Amino acid sequence: ETGVTQSPTHLIKTRGQQVTLRCSSQSGHNTVSWYQQALGQGPQFIFQYYREEENGRGNFPPRFSGLQFPNYSSELNVNALELDDSALYLCASSLGRRAETQYFGPGTRLLVL
Amino acid sequence: AQSVTQLDSQVPVFEEAPVELRCNYSSSVSVYLFWYVQYPNQGLQLLLKYLSGSTLVKGINGFEAEFNKSQTSFHLRKPSVHISDTAEYFCAVSEPGETSGSRLTFGEGTQLTVNP
């Protein structure tokens, strides 16, 4: 059984640029959730996708957008990067619309300069 | 809206001592409760979860937690810790939805440091 994988592991961008982060869900899972974890804080929910449709969104601006593909992998896109976007971005996969139990990947660490 | 409070930001203990990491939550409805562990420069690993049933939940690595509905708590315990338990521990809550997905709300984390 393959766990959740994320790419890249680390990324450095400059303010105003755009970034795309990728996530492959655990085998058999059809729901993907994205979280942002700033340094020294707990993760914050960004949004969730179930079978290619958005299934809930947290308090993040529209420049944070996402996509889920037919194979249930997912992308997180962030436009017009700001310094405060520097964080660890975590992807979690789960089974079913209710996504009761979420399993996390290793994360992508984004640094915005 | 749901929220989680982890009452201790740092907990230092000696090896082989017992430990309790405290977590309180607030929610207006029934909840699911989780503990995750995060080792340095890694993602989150699920330690244990409470969805329903027995209020005493056993997880991996010898950890257990007890759901107390009247006190809205979900404290994590281990009778004897090892150096390798040194990590950040996060308590999380979600509200089961019929037609929407569960979003996890996390506490700020508790850094457990086990000293020799």
Image (cartoon, coloured by chain):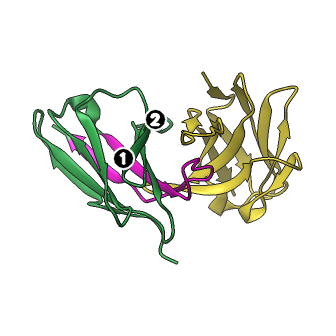
Chain colours: A green, B yellow
Q: Position of residue A40 (x, y in %)?
A: 46, 36
Looking at the rendering, the stretch of residues picked out in magenta corresponds to A87-111
Q: Name the foreground residue: B12 vs B87.
A: B87
Q: Please name whichever residue, B16 or A80, is drawn nearer the observer in this view of the structure.
A: A80
Q: Earlier in the sequence, mark 2 or mark 1?
A: 2
Q: Which residue is mark 2?
A: A44
Three-letter amino acid code at disc 2?
Gln
B7 sits to left or right of B16: left
**Residue beneath the point at 43% across and 31% down:** A58
Up the image or down, B67 lies above or below A91; here it is above
Q: Residue furthest bottom?
A: A1
Give the percent coordinates (x, y) of residue B92: 62, 39
The reply to whether residue B53 is visible in this rendering is yes
Q: Position of residue A48 (x, y in %)?
A: 43, 44
Task: Classify mark 1: helix, strand or loop.
Answer: strand
Label pair 2/1, CB-CB below 8 angstroms: no
B31 over A49 or under it: above or below? above
The quadrant where residue A105 appears: bottom left
The disc placed on residue A89 is: 1
Q: Position of residue A103 (x, y in %)?
A: 54, 57
Q: A80 or B107: which is nearer to us?
A: A80
Question: Hey, which quadrant is residue A37 in on the image?
Answer: top left
